[in-house]
Image (cartoon, rainbow, N blue to C red):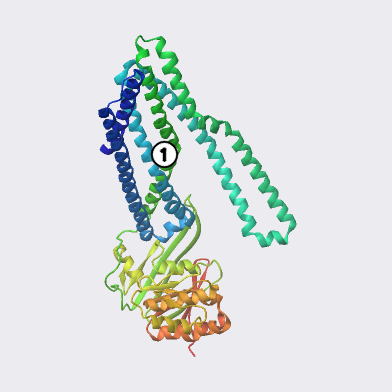
């Protein structure tokens, strides 16, 4: 702040020195070396303080933005799954990436605009030292011009809201051409109808933009119009009202010209300031939503094994949960149901599509909060403060699994062990493992699931959940999954729950449980062969 003030003061001193030199030259006097040295000194101070001010401000702002990005990522990783699902990936990415990037790009310009504000203040103070009445008149003219500018800018912002909405509709319509390309190439009527709708949207957008073109022209011409208007007041109006004004008119005119640059910078930054304010509002709103969905009793990264290691059984008693829309209306309810898992048990979870099998797995693994019921480990109710330790028991592969680019959290794994697992999953000809990461993820869905299986086996958790893992495998690997991988996990004392439709393998389970529209309707023992 002090450096910025010094830069503004140096700017005003430069104006005064220039006017003194011009006055001396006009009267035929020689400009002294002392005045020239003062000018060079003021110029050096102006350049150096401006540089220092911009650099310090940019360093400070980028540091705060870095902290903001880290804080957002930290809140995201701590949030509940349902909170992130309600927010949506698009909104998260837009705020974390787009909004913070916009702030990063706009803040230096806003800093420059704040510097211009100080320059404007010192220019006006210099004018006040020449003529107090001129200072009052110029301030009034500048204030009126800025008020007019902001009123026009507000009208333009209001008009741009409709343009933004229309552009979004245009992009949504354009996306159908690429995402639905196969369909429209097979159906000419659908192709023509889609293009006709897109044409209507583009025409409406064009009409909106043409309609607000006049507002843009006024704003674009504002700086030049303000310059000539201000000079007109200084040169043509003020001399007629104030005696003795002609002696300093050229000095005030020069100072008034210097005022135009800061005013232009301030008005140009107005839309950036509005955009930054909106962006920060989106960021803070996202933080509030993440904080509201943050679980109680959060435990940071564990440094010791889970306190539930070596459990004997887990009971799920009266479990109930509902998906709700923003109006809090229930769209699907599961439960109440009860189930017990035993160490070393292989359980198959059956049921039709939409019966709630994946939801049940997320409830059992602690990813979803319970609306009702209780989870007990060896007869002890699960408390919120140990929820993360409970989650550490599980390794899950869901249909919408994410395959990370490297083995996060498995930094000390033996590369040879990974390569042996790659060979076992019959991926050696497609995937390598170097520097803690797989060489490629450009694979089929079934092959990507095998990489996810490798990661799950390396994690070596107590409980494994496989949700339709075999659905995308060929017949050979589907058989290997049921007859080799699952029995080996069971032999190692792992508890395994498998969501499956492969009825020819059901007899390999210890138990089968069936879900129907969120209700458990039966539990049967499998027949081991």
Q: Quadrant of residue 81?
A: bottom left
| Residue 1: x %, y % from top left | 28, 38
SS of the residue at dot 1?
A: helix
Q: Residue at x 48, y 88 (%)?
A: 528
Q: Residue at x 33, y 66 (%)?
A: 388
Residue 413 or residue 108, whichever sits in front: 108
Residue 391 or residue 356, whichever sits in front: 391
Q: Is residue 411 above or below residue 163?
A: below
Q: Is residue 475 above or below residue 327?
A: below
Q: Residue at x 41, y 24 (%)?
A: 142
Q: Is residue 76 above or below residue 424?
A: above
Q: Quadrant of residue 366?
A: bottom left
| Residue 23: x %, y % from top left | 34, 20
Q: Is residue 68 above or below residue 204?
A: below
| Residue 399: x %, y % from top left | 51, 69
Say left or right for 13 vs 513: left
Q: What residue did someone put label 1 on? A: 273
């Amino acid at each position: 702040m002090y450096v910025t003030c010094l830069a503004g003061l140096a700017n005003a001193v430069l104006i005064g020195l220039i006017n003194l030199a011009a006055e001396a030259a006009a009267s035929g006097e020689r400009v002294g070396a002392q005045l020239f040295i003062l000018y060079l000194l003021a110029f050096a101070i102006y350049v150096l303080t401006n540089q220092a001010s911009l650099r310090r401000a940019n360093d400070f702002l980028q540091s705060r933005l870095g902290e903001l990005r880290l804080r957002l990522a930290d809140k995201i990783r701590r949030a509940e799954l349902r909170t992130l699902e309600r927010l949506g990936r698009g909104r998260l990415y837009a705020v974390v990436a787009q909004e913070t990037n916009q702030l990063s790009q706009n803040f230096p310009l806003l800093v420059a605009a704040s510097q211009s504000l100080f320059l404007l203040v010192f220019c006006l103070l210099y004018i006040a030292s020449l003529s107090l009445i001129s200072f009052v008149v110029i301030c009034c003219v500048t204030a009126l011009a800025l008020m007019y500018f902001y009123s026009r800018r507000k009208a333009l912002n209001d008009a741009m809201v409709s343009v933004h909405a229309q552009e979004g509709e245009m992009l949504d319509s354009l996306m159908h051409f690429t995402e639905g390309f196969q369909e429209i190439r097979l159906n000419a009527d659908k192709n023509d109808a889609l293009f006709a709708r897109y044409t209507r949207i583009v025409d409406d957008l064009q009409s909106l933009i043409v309609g607000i073109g006049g507002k843009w022209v006024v704003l674009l011409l504002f700086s030049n119009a303000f310059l000539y208007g201000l000079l007109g007041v200084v040169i043509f109006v003020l001399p007629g009202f104030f005696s003795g004004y002609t002696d300093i008119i050229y000095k005030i005119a020069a100072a008034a010209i210097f005022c135009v640059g800061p005013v232009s910078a301030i008005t140009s930054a107005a839309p950036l300031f509005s955009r930054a304010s909106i962006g920060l509002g989106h960021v803070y709103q996202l933080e509030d939503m993440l904080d509201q969905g943050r679980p109680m009793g959060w435990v940071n990264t564990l440094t010791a094994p889970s306190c539930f290691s070596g459990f004997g059984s887990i009971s799920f008693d009266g479990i109930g949960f509902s998906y709700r829309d923003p109006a809090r209306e229930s769209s699907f309810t599961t439960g109440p149901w009860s189930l017990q898992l035993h160490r070393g048990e292989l359980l198959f979870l059956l049921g039709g599509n939409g019966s709630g099998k994946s939801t049940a797995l997320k409830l059992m693994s602690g990813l979803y909060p319970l609306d009702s019921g209780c989870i007990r480990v060896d007869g002890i109710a699960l408390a919120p403060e140990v929820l993360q330790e409970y989650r550490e028991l599980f390794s899950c592969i869901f249909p919408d699994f994410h395959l990370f680019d490297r083995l996060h959290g498995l930094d000390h794994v033996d590369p040879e062990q990974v390569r042996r697992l790659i060979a076992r999953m019959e991926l050696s000809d497609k995937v390598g493992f170097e520097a803690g990461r797989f060489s490629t993820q450009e694979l089929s869905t079934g092959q990507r699931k095998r990489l996810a299986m490798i990661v799950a086996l390396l994690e070596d958790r107590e409980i494994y959940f496989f949700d339709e893992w075999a659905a995308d495998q060929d017949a050979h690997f589907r058989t290997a999954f049921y007859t080799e991988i699952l029995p080996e996990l069971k032999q190692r004392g792992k508890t395994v729950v498998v969501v499956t439709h492969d009825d020819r393998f059901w007899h390999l389970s210890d138990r089968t449980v069936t879900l129907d529209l969120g209700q458990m309707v039966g539990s049967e023992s499998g027949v081991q062969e």
